[in-house]
Image: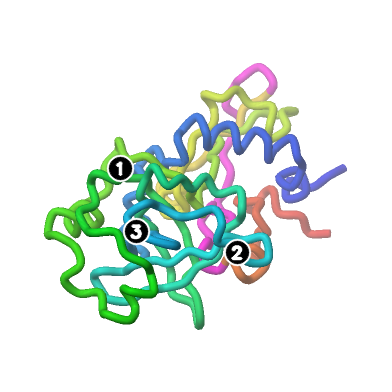
Amino acid sequence: MSSYQELLLREEWNHKRRSILGRDNLKCQNCFNKQYQEEFKSGLVFSNNIPNGASQTVIHNDRFIIHIWDMKNNVIKTAFLDVNSNFSTGNSYVCYYQDQASYANVFAIKIIENNQIELREMWALEIIRRGMKGKVTDRTFERIYQPIDENDIWDMTKGLHVHHRYYKQDLLPWQYPDDALITLCWSCHENLHKNQKVPILDALGNDIGDHTCCRRCHGAGEFPQWKHIEGGLCFNCWGAKYEELISHE
């Protein structure tokens, strides 16, 4: 019989998870992705020229090369994204990233309209050679760094979890109805499990107990800031999230 960790690796769960993330518009339903702004640095995304988004011709080893213009810190960072990213020259993008040794690790990308960006078109090389200060208006700076709003539109996000509101006997993770599942960011998910227990129901829907959150990740199952190590999985529960579901084989 498969462990809970193994079930979460099945394509059936991946399909269900993608469906819920899409339904919730790649957005934590508690903080609306505000945690990304609090946790990470950010800037305007560009490739060949700006403000027209990212060009799909800039590819290296099957990944997009993008640049992030971090106007707060007056630096340009390089990042790599999968080729299935939905970049379009019809939009502009705000990227939330974490510094790595030689590149930026992208955690989320928010879409904004090109008419929100007020600066003349220029090549990335021109920005690097001539300096970046004074290239944008105050309105543009404020638009890029304004607080995240629940109506914002997102192109991609890492670190989102699909939370089960309850567990029911004899149901596999992907067999729950959609209204039993909700998208949460890693931080909101962890805080929820610190303060609540997930009900366990029998086959008839009667409450028969609670699950105890993993003592290390507090029920989050992973640490997105450590994605580069074993995919960020918690080394105590290995993604199972609850002490009762940890396999001890």
Where residue 193 appears, as percent x and y from the top left, is: 47, 48
Q: Label 3 vs label 2: CA separation?
A: 33 Å
Q: Is residue 17 above or below residue 146?
A: above
Rendered residue at 42%/65% (across/down): 97
Q: Nearer the viewer, residue 145 or 150?
A: 145
Q: Amino acid at mark 3?
A: Ile
Q: Quadrant of the C terminus?
A: bottom right
Residue 192 position, x and y percent, is 42, 46
Of mark 1 and mark 2, the one earlier in the sequence is: 1
**Which SS type dominates the magenta stretch?**
loop
Q: Residue furthest right?
A: 1
Whether residue 224 appears in magenta in the rendering, the answer is yes
- Image: magenta residue range: 203-226
Left or right position of 22 against 32: right
Horizontal and vertical percent position of residue 74:
26, 76
Q: Pick whichever of labels 1 and 3 is earlier in the sequence.
A: 3
Q: Quadrant of residue 136?
A: bottom left
Q: Are marks 3 and 2 in contact (CB under 8 Å)?
A: no
What is the number of the mark on residue 44? Answer: none
Q: In the figure, is residue 48 to the left or right of 2?
A: left
Q: CA distance from mark 1 to mark 2?
A: 33 Å
Query: What label does residue 232 carry, if any?
Result: 2
The amino acid pointed to by label 1 is: Glu
Mark 3 falls on what kind of element?
A: strand
Residue 23, x across and y down, in percent: 50, 29
Q: Quadrant of residue 232?
A: bottom right
CB within 8 Å, label 1 to label 2: no
The numbered mark at residue 50 is 3
Label ID, residue 113: 1
Which of the two residues, 190 or 30, is positioned nearer the viewer here? Answer: 30
> As rendered, which of 99 and 75 lies closer to the eye?
75
